[in-house]
């Protein structure tokens, strides 16, 4: 393995950003409304220069009103899920950890649903309760996953799966007993839905995303050491409890954020960090930014498929990530242990 | 240190991307606002009547600016498609939701996706003057998003037969087909009145209405189907506050309904009723029910699932199957009895009572 220089990190980021750009352009081009690449480019350039009135109004509506916000939301959700997956994998020293498997997504979904039941008038409450739900769930799973004071890999995953199914049961209970039609759209939302723009605005979500990813990035060298064992990291001078606190809170924040705006989209947090590890090595200094951009690519691409494969009918994006993610994951597993 | 600088660089790039998106969004809002003021200016000078709007309150309580002249309509649910056809406005219908199969001609209209999850691009692409929605089959988020894109959305809220009739009148008003709506509704009302006079004095049938068989789902008291059953001389044995409750087989046994009513695709009627009955007689659980043993099973066409004009057809067919004697009797005096009875009654209902108490009079009068 070549040494990890800042130059190499920047190169990898630039490469992935290039792929992301191609995906974004592709995604802006395809859809139920036919629009040529040239028109997309013209619309973007004119928009960037501020010549709004020279753009045909339906092109402007499609590109800036519908596709771009949706792609931006997909990028945001993908980056958040993927980085939180990568950090759970380090902290729990378990390659199968991911917000979905650990039940953190279910906790966030329950929080978001409770906010819809009780606090619908406050758009903030959805993100806030989803974050609290994610945080409470990871705390519960963490304590359930310990045996004799040690974090046990198998116990932890079982604890996560059981917590997830318990939380799903509560969600099902709420969905079937709370009458009123607000919860019926939830079935779609739970499968993952990027079509609905968040009530609190994309810009604000981007700021939270950057804070969360930034906080995790500052701990990336420590995460590398923690991967070898908490005891060893402690002896090497890592303030393990502090790092764990920062990463748990940040990863829960990212999961809560993603789930509250898009529902539960599975496999991104599990699969993308694995692919990035295979491509660029397991050093967290490169894995965190690579996972962020890689996750953005994955979800933007999945959502493009979701809204075009059987157009004009739209699939839930969670169904697309699972349909692609599960076989790819099995392939990776078998190749690794072959 | 160096890696931190790298992280900083990544962060800055990401921030820039975020900032671009925000800026773009603000610009759209600005451009939209600018366009709106232009629109207002135009409408004031009465250059183009098409841009003129008037404000109405829809059935969900939203204030909507509706174009005065509606040339292009999108119907986001199958019942709305059927209503637009009933109003004779099908030529202006430029997009319909999936499952819009009634009337059959509607199948050839451009599809814009599932009612719960429509394709917004496909809607924008057909340049609608108005999008018709329902609070039952569509999501509030869809309405909000279309409104944000500057598309007028009118939402209906079907909860009873009477509210469905009112929705037809409202939609007629919104799309500029008031006279047509009035005649459609008057015709449907007279049919309901005729039905009511036929069923006067007939004992109410206690029915178990099956919305879905697996899992077994029935209906609550506040649904339009429960109301439709009352018009057909029936009463659901399920008393639930929830709209579409899941029911256990044991509950059905305990409630011991007189009739089982199924909705099926196709026309319902005797053929499918016989088929359904023979199937139920072969299934454990179902075959023990008194209603099945006595052959009191009715299959109605799935028109009963749609709050649209076809619902009245379904009510009539259901009433015929549940109370054949009432109709056999009426058939003997057909034409002689009907007219003098219902004409004065309609006049009485229309002049003296509001729509709501009219519904109550019909539903609970017997």
Image (tube, coloured by chain):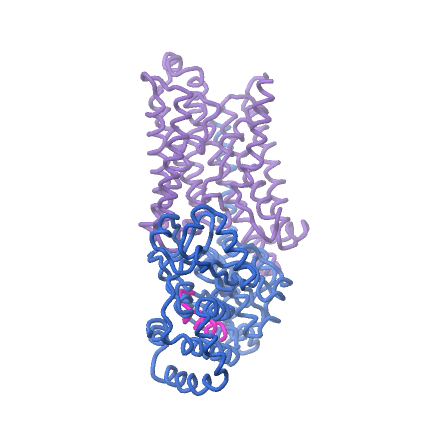
Chain colours: A purple, B blue
In depth, the one of B311 and B288 nearer the eye is B288
- Name, please, the residue furthest toward the front: B294
Residue A182 forms part of the magenta stretch: no
Q: Is residue B68 above or below residue A105?
A: below
Q: Position of residue A269 (x, y in %)?
A: 49, 32
User: Which residue shows up at 46% across the image and 53% down it?
Assistant: B212
Number of marks in the rendered image: 0
User: Which residue shows up at 61% across the image and 49% down it?
Assistant: A310
Residue B127 is left or right of residue B290, and the answer is right
Q: Position of residue A156 (x, y in %)?
A: 39, 24
User: Which residue shows up at 54% across the image and 70% down it?
Assistant: B84
Q: Is residue A317 above or below residue B347?
A: above
Q: Position of residue A56 (x, y in %)?
A: 62, 60
Q: The C terminus of chain B lies in which quarter of the figure?
A: bottom left
Q: Position of residue A231 (x, y in %)?
A: 37, 13
Residue B159 forms part of the magenta stretch: yes
Can the viewer see residue A72?
A: yes
In depth, the one of B342 and B159 nearer the eye is B342
Residue B81 is left or right of residue A231, and the answer is right
In depth, the one of B316 and B153 nearer the eye is B316
Q: Main secondary structure of the magenta part?
A: helix
Q: Is residue A210 above or below residue B262?
A: above
Span of residues in magenta: B158-172
Can the viewer see residue A45?
A: no
Residue B301 is left or right of residue A248, and the answer is right
């Amino acid at each position: 393995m070549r040494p990890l220089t800042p130059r190499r990190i920047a190169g990898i980021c630039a490469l992935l950003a290039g792929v992301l750009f191609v995906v974004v352009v592709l995604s802006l081009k395809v859809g139920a409304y036919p629009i040529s690449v040239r028109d997309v480019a013209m619309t973007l350039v004119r928009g960037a220069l501020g010549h709004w009135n020279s753009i045909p109004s339906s092109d402007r509506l499609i590109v800036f009103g519908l596709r771009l916000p949706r792609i931006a939301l997909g990028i945001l959700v993908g980056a958040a899920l993927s980085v939180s997956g990568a950090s759970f994998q380090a902290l729990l020293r378990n390659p199968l950890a991911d917000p979905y498997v650990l039940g953190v997504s279910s906790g966030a979904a329950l929080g978001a649903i409770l906010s819809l039941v009780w606090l619908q008038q406050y758009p903030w409450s959805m993100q806030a309760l989803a974050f609290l739900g994610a945080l409470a769930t990871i705390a519960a799973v963490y304590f359930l996953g310990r045996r004799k004071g040690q974090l046990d890999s198998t116990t932890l995953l079982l604890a996560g799966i059981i917590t997830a199914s318990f939380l799903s049961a509560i969600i099902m209970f709420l969905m079937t007993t709370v009458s009123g039609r607000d919860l019926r759209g939830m079935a779609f939302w739970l499968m993952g839905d990027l079509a609905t723009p968040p009530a609190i605005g994309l810009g604000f979500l981007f700021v939270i995303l950057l804070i969360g990813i930034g906080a995790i990035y500052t701990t990336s060298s420590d995460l590398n050491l923690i991967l070898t064992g908490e005891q060893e990291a402690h002896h090497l001078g890592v303030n393990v409890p502090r790092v764990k606190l920062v990463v748990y809170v940040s990863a829960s924040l990212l999961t809560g954020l993603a789930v509250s705006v898009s529902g539960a989209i599975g496999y991104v947090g599990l699969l993308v960090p694995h692919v990035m590890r295979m491509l660029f090595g397991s050093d967290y200094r490169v894995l965190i930014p690579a996972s962020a951009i890689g996750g953005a690519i994955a979800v933007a691409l999945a959502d493009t498929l979701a809204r075009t494969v059987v157009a004009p009918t739209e699939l839930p994006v969670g169904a697309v990530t699972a349909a692609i993610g599960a076989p790819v994951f099995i392939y990776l597993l078998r190749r690794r242990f072959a | 240190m160096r890696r931190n600088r790298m992280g900083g660089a990544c962060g800055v790039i990401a921030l820039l991307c975020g900032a671009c998106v925000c800026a773009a969004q603000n610009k759209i809002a600005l451009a939209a606002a600018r366009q709106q003021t232009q629109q207002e200016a135009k409408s004031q000078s009465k250059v183009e009547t098409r841009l003129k709007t008037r404000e109405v309150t829809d059935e969900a309580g939203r204030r909507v600016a509706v174009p005065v002249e509606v040339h292009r309509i999108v119907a986001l649910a199958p019942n709305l498609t059927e209503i637009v056809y009933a109003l004779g406005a099908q030529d202006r219908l430029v997009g319909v939701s999936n499952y819009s199969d009634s009337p059959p001609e509607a199948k050839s209209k451009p599809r814009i996706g599932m009612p719960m999850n429509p394709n917004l691009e496909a809607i924008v692409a057909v340049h609608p003057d108005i999008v018709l929605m329902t609070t039952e089959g569509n999501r509030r988020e869809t309405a909000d998003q279309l409104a944000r894109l500057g598309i007028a959305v009118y939402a209906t809220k079907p909860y009873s037969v009477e509210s469905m009739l009112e929705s037809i009148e409202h939609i007629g008003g919104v799309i500029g087909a008031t006279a047509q709506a009035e005649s459609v509704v008057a015709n449907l009302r007279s049919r309901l009145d005729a039905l009511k006079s036929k069923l006067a004095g007939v004992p109410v049938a206690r029915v178990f209405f099956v919305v879905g068989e697996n899992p077994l789902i029935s209906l609550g008291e506040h649904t339009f189907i429960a109301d439709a059953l009352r018009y057909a001389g029936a009463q659901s044995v399920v008393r639930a506050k929830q709209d579409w409750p899941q029911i256990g087989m044991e509950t059905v046994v305990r409630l011991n309904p007189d009739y089982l009513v199924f909705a099926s695709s196709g026309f319902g009627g005797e053929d499918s009723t016989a088929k359904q009955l023979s199937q139920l007689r072969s299934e454990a659980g179902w075959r023990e029910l008194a209603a099945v043993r006595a052959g009191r099973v009715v299959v109605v066409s799935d028109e009963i699932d749609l709050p649209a004009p076809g619902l009245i057809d379904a009510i009539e067919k259901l009433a015929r199957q549940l109370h054949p004697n009432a109709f056999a009797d009426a058939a003997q005096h057909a034409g002689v009895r009907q007219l003098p009875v219902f004409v004065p009654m309609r006049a009485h209902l229309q002049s003296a009572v509001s729509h709501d108490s009219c519904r109550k009079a019909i539903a609970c009068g017997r």
